[in-house]
Amino acid sequence: MTFTYPAVFTPQKEGSGYHVVFPDLEGCEAEGPDLEDAIDNAADAAYNWICAEMEEEECELPSQTHEDDLILEEGQFVRKILVRIKLLPDND
């Protein structure tokens, strides 16, 4: 399965680095010392969030907000983060 969610990147006020928040994935956040690491860490965080949600009995993954509907503060920007999850057959 493939999922794509918008992530809001906020540059750190001191030094370099980014803080990342997924508006659609409650509590899903990441950070990185540079943009490349922040993107990788955001993808890992989203993967873990989605996997945890899929383990719930009543799995309801949120719909994806269109990036034009997001309200950004100065300096923030949006990147779409793609997450691929390979589902294995249940052996029960």
Image (spheres, rainbow, N blue to C red):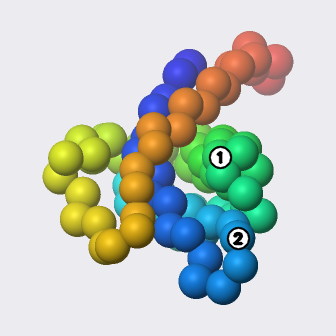
Residue flagged by tag 1: what amino acid is it?
Answer: Ile
Q: Residue at x 41, y 64 (%)?
A: 76
Q: Position of residue 84 (x, y in %)?
A: 63, 25
Question: How many badges with numbers are in the image?
Answer: 2
Q: What residue is shown with label 1?
A: 39
Q: Quadrant of residue 15?
A: bottom right
* Camera-nearest residue between 56 and 52: 52
Q: Residue at x 69, y 67 (%)?
A: 17
Q: Position of residue 91 (x, y in %)?
A: 82, 18
* Camera-nearest residue between 65 and 31: 31
Q: Is residue 58 left or right of residue 66?
A: right
Q: Residue at x 19, y 47 (%)?
A: 68
In primary-sequence order, the first of circles 1 and 2 is 2
Q: Is residue 14 left or right of residue 74?
A: right
Residue that extends furthest to the top in the rendered view of this protein: 89
Residue 84 vertical placement versus 79 (above, below): above
Q: Quadrant of residue 54?
A: top right
* Camera-nearest residue between 30 and 34: 34
Q: What residue is shown with label 2?
A: 16
Residue flagged by tag 2: what amino acid is it?
Answer: Ser
Circle 2 — which element? loop
